[in-house]
Amino acid sequence: MKNILIVGSGIVGITTAIKFQKSGYSVTIVDKSEPGNACSFGNAGVLGTSTCTPLSMPGIISDIPKLLFDDESALTIKASYLARNLTWFSRFLAESKKRNVSKSAQAMRLLNGPSVILYKALAKEAQCESLIKNNGYLHLYENSDVYHASKFAWTLRSQNGVTFEDLSAPEIRDLLPSVSEKIRHGIYVESDGHCINPKRLVDKLFEYFTSLGGKYLCTEAHLNKTSKSKLEVVSSHGVLNYDKLVICTGSSTKKLLENIGYSIPILPERGYHLSLKNPNVKPAMTIMSGDYKYVTTLMEDGLRLAGIAEFGAEKSAESYEKVTNKYLRLVKRMFPAIECDDASLWSGCRPSTPDSNPIIDKLSNFENVFVNAGHGHTGLAGAPRSAEILFDLVEGNPCEATDMFNENRF
Ligand SMILES: Cc1cc2nc3c(=O)[nH]c(=O)nc-3n(C[C@H](O)[C@H](O)[C@H](O)COP(=O)(O)OP(=O)(O)OC[C@H]3O[C@@H](n4cnc5c(N)ncnc54)[C@H](O)[C@@H]3O)c2cc1C
């Protein structure tokens, strides 16, 4: 039986581990923390089968002043961070060309499209089916200009096989009586779903993995180059043996690989969620504010708002206060009568690549070393399909999708 060592037990590591363990490999996961404690803890739970619009879209170049200097922008970039990571950001901007966007969208749809089906099957095996909902995704717009400008994104979705329905203002209010009168346009995607507790999902999948015989070591992994093409994994448990090594370390991947002189284009992108406990507004479906680019998901422990993203931002009391107030302002604008008992902010880093798609590949120059990381804004949705693509690659049966996620595309 072949030994697979997987570094990282976020949603990507755990879905990858299950895929290999179920297929007859002997899998050990190594994580410096408990499973699902990093980015996979705090996502918005969206299983966006329809999500295929990359972050770098046509027109982003004219948004640069806003990204750098406007605190109200959903996405911000610290100027000093941009200067330190010029190669990554140049590539990010280059990805906004229509031809590139069309390729990225295809790849995103391939990963995210089957997410609800794959999670329903996984959750059934792991006996946590109630965590997965299939209640759709409602995109709402106040500003008609923003709504009309979103046409390119909706055409992209449509070209990738997504079906959706335009809703009139009265139809929106029938669905969501508590929504603001300011909301004028809506687009509903019925096929999308969400997970009502992303951390509990990882916990249940981890339990399932161990019930299949999978092993887990809580320790930090370090990489050493022992020859031109060989890597050893060093930990507090000594050197860890493997036949195949898979790196699923999310936003830490760049740093981990830098130690062996390997550069991979995955930057940490800070995100925040605000959790509102006992809200009096409980939308069944996920809601996206098209105007302010944040999402609202009803979780089992309250309403979760997410979407603010920052490159180069550090955690600080000041930024926590600023982001909390911003979310509270925005949600009041969407649901004027909203009330809750308590609001708490969480933050963590997304693993982001210039084209919003992960790297699922063998590391060039190294024997038996693979990577599945860089899922950006849609890693919850894309994880199970990315595990299948990686599995086929390791087995020596690369599928047609392999090229879309290889490292050489950058
Ligand atoms: C606010 C927010 C909202 C989001 N909303 C959504 C959403 O609605 N839908 C969606 O699909 N996606 C969403 N995402 C994105 C999604 O959460 C991520 O893409 C996904 O969680 C990445 O998973 P991962 O397993 O690659 O990384 P992580 O969850 O970060 O896991 C990486 C693991 O590697 C471990 N590790 C790192 N280095 C080492 C080392 N040297 N040794 C041992 N262990 C190590 C870490 O401890 C960690 O457990 C959101 C993200 C954020 C921040």
Image (tube, rainbow, N blue to C red):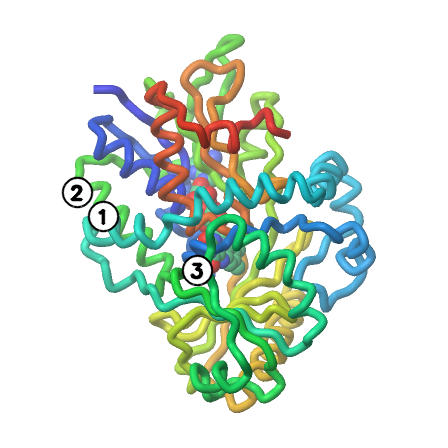
- Note whether 255 is above or below 238 in the view shown: below
* Badge 1 amino acid: Glu
Q: Is mark 1 within 8 Å of ligand 1?
A: no
* Badge 3 amino acid: Val
Q: Residue at x 41, y 38 (%)?
A: 386
- Note whether 184 is above or below 369 in the view shown: below
Q: Is mark 3 within 8 Å of ligand 1?
A: yes
Q: Give the labeled residue for mark 3.
A: 46
Q: Which residue is drawn at 63% across and 72% down?
A: 321
**On the picture, is 77 further left or further right than 285?**
right
* Badge 2 amino acid: Ser
Q: Give the labeled residue for mark 1.
A: 207
Query: In the picture, residue 391 is in which quadrant?
Result: top left
> Disc 2 on helix, strand or loop?
helix
Q: Give the labeled residue for mark 2.
A: 211
- For label 3, the crowd category at 10 Å Cα-Cα, with few meaning under 14, some 14 to 19 and many 20 or more, is many
